């Protein structure tokens, strides 16, 4: 069963659309489609190159048809002519025939041992689509699975941050603050792995909200919760904050680069820029100044 999602991520429609666009380019097949698995069944929602709406919204159960076979066995499968095929059930022959497709290959989107969706490539000729097409479709499904795994981890971190920000004030502050700092840095690092720019920006804004909530409830020592403090707060770029959040955990430039996918020299450049904006002359003073201004937990 997929993990619960945060309000930042109601569904993964955008990721499936991107994966189908990639699959169409890589396979060279005109018709591609797919959808997510919800409540134990596959629902076909995303289509490119179809001529009708006969399959739109179709709910495919485990073991039923080609998609159900893939859902149950968790491996790619293909048929060269769908309707007379003897290796699958024929619960969905009518919508498939109305669309006019015959050769179909399907690949599972597998995340942590569970199928979260299925991608299809189809042709209107009764001929095998071939290993090259299958390999390209599987690669698109693998990339989509990686994106979904990252989003799942983001949701998990968001829930942990929510718990840290809402912790009762009578709890010992030091462990909660250490956890908040660690999660803040990791969440900012995870944001860089998300391809969708809008989701990445929303995640950064959510991270800032959790940071300010932690300060206002006594979780941090900055001045962001004081009246008028925000007016004089330096404006650091998202990348400068990403670097500082990991420096605050004691990471070297090389380690920061590994976490954020940057060269050490690039990390140093972001640090120089941040220290200049904060009016200090060392990485440690930069971290202290960023905390005073409420930019870091």
Image (tube, grey):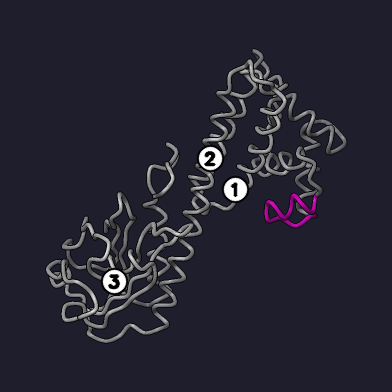
Give the label, 3 or 1, closer to the camera: 1
For residue 277, what is the image quadrant? top right
Q: Residue at x 67, y 44 (%)?
A: 239
Q: Residue at x 69, y 21 (%)?
A: 172
Give the label, 1 or 2, closer to the camera: 1
First in sequence, mark 1 or 2: give its number.
Answer: 1
Which one is nearer the viewer's eye here, 136 or 179?
Answer: 179
What range is drawn magenta here?
253-264
Expressed as whole percent of the image width and height from the top left, the position of residue 240 reads 71, 42
Q: Where is mark 3, residue-wise? A: 31
Expressed as whole percent of the image width and height from the top left, the position of residue 139 reads 47, 70
Real-space CA distance between mark 3 and mark 2, rounded to the nearest whole angstrom: 34 Å
Q: Which mark is residue 190?
A: 1
Q: Where is mark 2, residue-wise? A: 203
Residue 126 located left or right of residue 238:
left
Q: Residue furthest top?
A: 227
**Dominant secondary structure, magenta:** helix
Real-space CA distance between mark 3 and mark 1, rounded to the nearest whole angstrom: 33 Å
Residue 124 located left or right of residue 277:
left
> Circle 1: is it few (<14), some (14-19), or many (20+) Cα within 10 Å?
some
Contact, mark 1 vs mark 2 (Cβ under 8 Å): yes
């Amino acid at each position: 069963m997929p993990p619960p999602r945060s309000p930042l991520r109601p569904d993964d429609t955008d990721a499936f659309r991107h994966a189908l666009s990639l699959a169409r380019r890589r396979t060279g097949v005109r018709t591609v489609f797919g959808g997510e698995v919800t409540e134990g069944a596959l629902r076909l929602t995303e289509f490119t190159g179809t001529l009708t709406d006969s399959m739109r919204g179709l709910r495919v159960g485990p073991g039923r048809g080609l998609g159900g076979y893939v859902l149950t066995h968790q491996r790619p499968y293909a048929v060269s002519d769908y309707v007379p095929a003897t290796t699958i059930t024929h619960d969905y022959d009518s919508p498939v025939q109305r669309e006019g497709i015959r050769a179909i290959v399907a690949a599972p989107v597998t995340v942590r041992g569970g199928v979260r969706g299925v991608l299809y490539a189809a042709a209107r000729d009764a001929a095998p689509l071939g290993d090259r097409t299958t390999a390209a479709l599987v690669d698109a499904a693998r990339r989509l699975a990686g994106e979904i795994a990252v989003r799942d981890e983001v949701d998990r971190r968001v829930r942990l941050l929510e718990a840290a920000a809402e912790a009762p004030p009578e709890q010992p502050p030091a462990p909660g603050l250490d956890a908040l700092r660690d999660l803040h840095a990791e969440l900012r690092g995870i944001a860089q792995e998300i391809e969708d720019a809008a989701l990445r920006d929303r995640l950064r804004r959510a991270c800032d909200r959790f940071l300010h909530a932690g300060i206002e409830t006594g979780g941090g020592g900055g001045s962001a919760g004081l009246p008028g403090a925000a007016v004089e707060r330096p404006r650091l770029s998202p990348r400068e904050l990403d670097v500082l959040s990991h420096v605050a955990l004691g990471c070297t430039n090389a380690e920061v680069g590994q976490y954020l996918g940057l060269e050490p020299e690039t990390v140093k450049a972001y640090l120089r820029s941040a220290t200049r904006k904060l009016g200090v002359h060392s990485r440690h003073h930069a971290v202290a100044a960023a905390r005073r201004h409420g930019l870091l937990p």
